[in-house]
Amino acid sequence: MVVGESKPIEEILAMVADFDKILLTGCKGCVTVCNAGGQKEVGILASALKIARKKEGREIQIDEVTLERQCDPEYIDQLEEPINNNSYDAVVSMACSVGPQYIAARYEDLLVFPALNTTFIGGSLEHGVWAEFCQACGACGIHNFGALCPIARCAKSLLNGPCGGSSGGKCEISPETDCVWHLIYDRMNRLGQLDKMANVVMFKDWTTSRDGGPRKIVREDLKQ
Amino acid sequence: MKAQSNLERVFAAGHFAVTGELGPPRGADAEVIKEKGQYLVGLVDSVNVTDNQTAVVRMASMAVCRLLLDMGLEPNLQMVCRDRNRLAIQADLLGASALGIKNVLCLSGDHQKFGDHPQAKNVFDIDSMQLIATCKKMRDEGKLINEHELEGVPHFFIGAAANPFADPFDFRVTRLAKKIEAGVDFIQSQCIYNMDKFRTWMQQANDLGLTEKCYIMAGITPLKSVGMARYMQKFVPGLDVPEEYIARLKGVEKKEQGAEGIKIAIEQIQEMKEMKGISGVHVMAIEWEEKVEEIVTGAGLLPRPEVS
Ligand code: SF4
Ligand code: SF4
C-alpha cells in the first residue's frame, strides 16, 4: 500500500492560519490501513486543530468527511454536497498526495492542502512500524534477487551488492537499516541459487521508472 | 598493454607496485594540491585522487588529476556513481582520457547521509560493477553503453576497490570475481588491519585463480593514535581493527603513538610483499601525506622503478 504519515501539527496549523472554515477530508484506502488519514485520524486532527486555534483566541470551523477513496473521480463526487453547500476557505486532505491533487483538479477555485507526507510503497512490519518495499520502477525484477527489492531497499539501489559498507547484516547508512543485499545473499543461499549471484547484473533501463517522465497506464480492454 | 599507464607498466614488468592517495581540498586553491602532491613525488607509481570522498564536496577529482600530471605524478581518477548518471559518467571518462588520465578507479561511493550535503538527491543510475563494464566497453569495443561508436577511444587501466572485511564474508571473494568478470585490471583493497581475515580472503582468491586475472593491491593506512583506531573500529562500517593493534598503540607514550602506527604499517607491508597473489600496496595516509616517505622507505620500496 501507499504509506504516509501526518505532517507535524505546526505545519498544518500554519497552512490554515488564515482560514476560519475548512473541510478536512480522510480516505478509507491505504492511509486508513496505515493509521494516517482514515476517519479516526480525521477526527483526531480536527480536534487538535480546533483546540490549538481556540488557544490562539481565533476559533476555526472544521467539517469532516472521509471518502471511500480519493484516487478515483467517482468518489470525489462525494465532495459535491458539502462543498456546494458551504463556503469553505480551503480543503485539507488526509489522503495520500493523490487525493489533494484530485480535489484541486475538480475544484479549480478552491485552495487545497495536504495534511500527510506520502512516504513510500510499503507494508507494516509490526504494529506501528512500516517499511518501504517498492519504488515503482515499472519493471519488476525481484525474482532475480530472491524476491527482495534492491532498488527500493538498498540505500544505493545497487544491482550488484552487497557493497563494502555492509556490516553485520546492516547497511552503512544506519545500524537500524537492514542491508537488503545481505538478506538477498542469505535467501539465495537457502534457495541454492548462490551461483546466480556470481553473474554481473548489467545496466537497468529506467525508462519505465519516473526517469522516463510521468507515467500513465492505458488499458484498452477497460476503457469505454 | 591496455592503457600504457605507469602503474600498468610497473605491474607488467613484475615489480611490486606502490600507489598513494590524495584528498582534494574543500576549496579552489591549486597550491594545496602542489603541496600535498610534492610529498608523493618519486615515492609512488600512481596517486589516487578521491572523488567527493565520504560525500563531502571537494575540488573535482579530474581537475586535480590534471594538476598532478603537470607535476609529473601519475594520477588514478576515482569515480563514484553517487553523483553522476550514465551520461555524465561517460562524458567525464572521455574528458579524463583527453586530459591524459590513464587510470580509473570505479566506485559506488559512500552514501551522502554522513556527508556535508545530506539533503542531496543521489544518482546511482549505474553501480560500480557496471561502471567497470562501462570503462571496458569504451576501451575494448570503442563504444558507449548505448552501442554508439566513439570517435577517439579512451584507454584506461581499470581499477576497483574490494573490501574483504564487509559482510557476508563468504560472498566477498565472489564479488571480487564479479569485478574481474566485469573487466577490472587491478584492485585496491580497503585498509587492512585484520591480517588473519585478509589472509583467508587472499587464500580464497588464489584458490579460485583470481590473482592470475588481475593485480591485487593491499590497502594500508597507518594508525595515528588510539583515538583514530577506536573511531575506525567503531564508526566506519566495513572496517575491522583488531584489539591487538590498539593494545600496541596503547603500549607506547601518547606522542609516540604515530610512530608506532607507522611501524605497524611497515610490518604489514613487509608481510604483503611476501604474500602470494599480492602485486602491490596502496598507501592511504589520510591527511598525513608527509609520512608516506618514511613508510615506503621503511618498507624498502624505494627507489621506484623507471619502466618504459
Ligand atoms: S523491482 Fe521495481 S517494481 Fe519491483 S519491487 Fe523493486 S522497485 Fe518495485
Ligand atoms: S550496505 Fe547493503 S543496503 Fe546499504 S548500500 Fe550497501 S549494499 Fe546497499
Image (cartoon, rainbow, N blue to C red):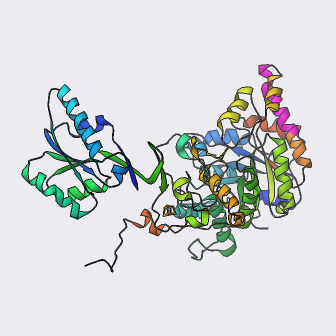
Rendering coords of residue B302 (x, y %): 88, 44
Dividing the picture into quadrants, the one containing residue B245 is top right
The question of residue B10 being in magenta is answered with no
Q: Is residue B255 magenta?
A: yes
Q: In the image, what residue occupies the spot 47% across and 63% down?
A: A137
Q: In the figure, B191 relative to A163: above or below? A: above
Camera-side residue of B283 and A11: A11
Q: Say if residue B301 shows up in the picture.
A: no
Please tell me whether the stretch drawn in magenta is mainly helix, strand or loop: helix
Q: Which residue is pictured at 25% across the width and 34% down the height?
A: A48
Q: Which residues are magenta?
A: B252-267
Between B248 and A104, the one lying in front of the other is A104
Up the image or down, A25 lies above or below B224; here it is: below
Q: Quadrant of the C terminus of chain B?
A: bottom right
Residue A181 % position (x, y):
62, 54
Give the quadrant of residue B173.
bottom right
Horizontal side, residue B265 vs residue B55: left or right: right
- In the current view of this chain or complex, which residue is farthest to the top? B253
Residue B193: give x, y in percent of width and height.
79, 39
Taking the image as shown, residue B204 lies to the left or right of residue B151, namely right
Residue B139 visible, this orientation: yes
Residue at x 50% of width, y 52% of height: B122
- For residue B171, what is the image quadrant? bottom right
